[in-house]
Image (cartoon, rainbow, N blue to C red):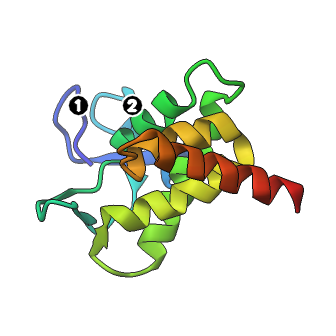
Amino acid sequence: MVCPMCASCDTKVVDKREADAVSTRRRRECLGCHQRFTTYERVEQMDLMVAKHDGRRESFNPDKLRTGITLAAAKRPVTSAQVDQIVQEVEAELRSAKTREVKAHDIGELVMPRLKQLDHVAYIRFASVYRDFTDVRSFQSEVKELLHDGKK
């Protein structure tokens, strides 16, 4: 590791901790200038590609998924931690499939039951965009199914 202060390659690790579930924080000391600095180490994930409905392909972006869920849950009793949890679970499930390409439809199918369990209004909002409701009947049909599931 190169020291950011003096560019020396002679450093040692002073402290190591788990920063979060996917990265390690290392506190280092330069043996040349004796300054300390922090580095983070994480596993490089394989690049997931998303096959869109119109045939385009783009890299999977968890921030884009987080934004979609956050918009669906706007002004609802859903915390950002709960949204982050859904995003992490969906991304983990996609990566565990060991495929490099996933259909946008499949991502929505992973989000829907999690939102349904968390908040019905957020679920309906997400479904209205994800399933591309074209009229009131399709919206009404989804609400009826939600009500029917709630009676079980």
| Pick the front one: 83 or 4 | 83
Q: Which is more toward the observer, 56 or 23?
A: 56
Q: In the drawing, does residue 76 fall left or right of residue 71?
A: right
Task: Where is residue 78? Give x, y as percent.
Answer: 67, 30
Residue in the picture at 82% in, 53% down? 150
Dot 1 crowding, Cα within 10 Å, few <14, some 14–19, many 20+:
few
Toward the left, the furthest residue is 56
Q: Which residue lies furthest to the top in this view?
A: 75
SS label for mark 2? strand
Instruction: Say which label, 1 or 2, has the lower sequence index.
Output: 1
| Secondary structure of the residue carrying numbered label 1 | loop
Marks 1/2: CA–CA distance: 8 Å
Q: Residue at x 27, y 75 (%)?
A: 100
Residue 44 seen in this snapshot: no
Residue 4 numbered mark, or none: 1
Name which residue lies at 27% across and 35% down: 32
Q: Specify whether 1 is left or right of 74.
A: left
Front one among 90 and 3: 90
Q: Is residue 123 above or below residue 32?
A: below
Query: Residue 23 at what x, y percent from top left?
Result: 48, 51
From the top left corner, tell me how far across and down residue 88 is, in percent: 53, 52
Badge 1 vs badge 2, beta-carbon distance below 8 Å = yes
Amino acid type of the residue that numbered disc 2 sits on in the rendered structure: Phe
Q: Residues within 10 Å of mark 2 (few under 14, many from 20)?
A: some
| Residue 143 left/right relative to 62 | right
Which residue is labeled 2 in the image? 37
Measured along the vertical axis of the image, is residue 83 above or below residue 24?
Answer: above
Residue 118 visible from this viewpoint = yes
Extreme residue in the right direction: 152
Report the quarter where the C terminus lies. bottom right
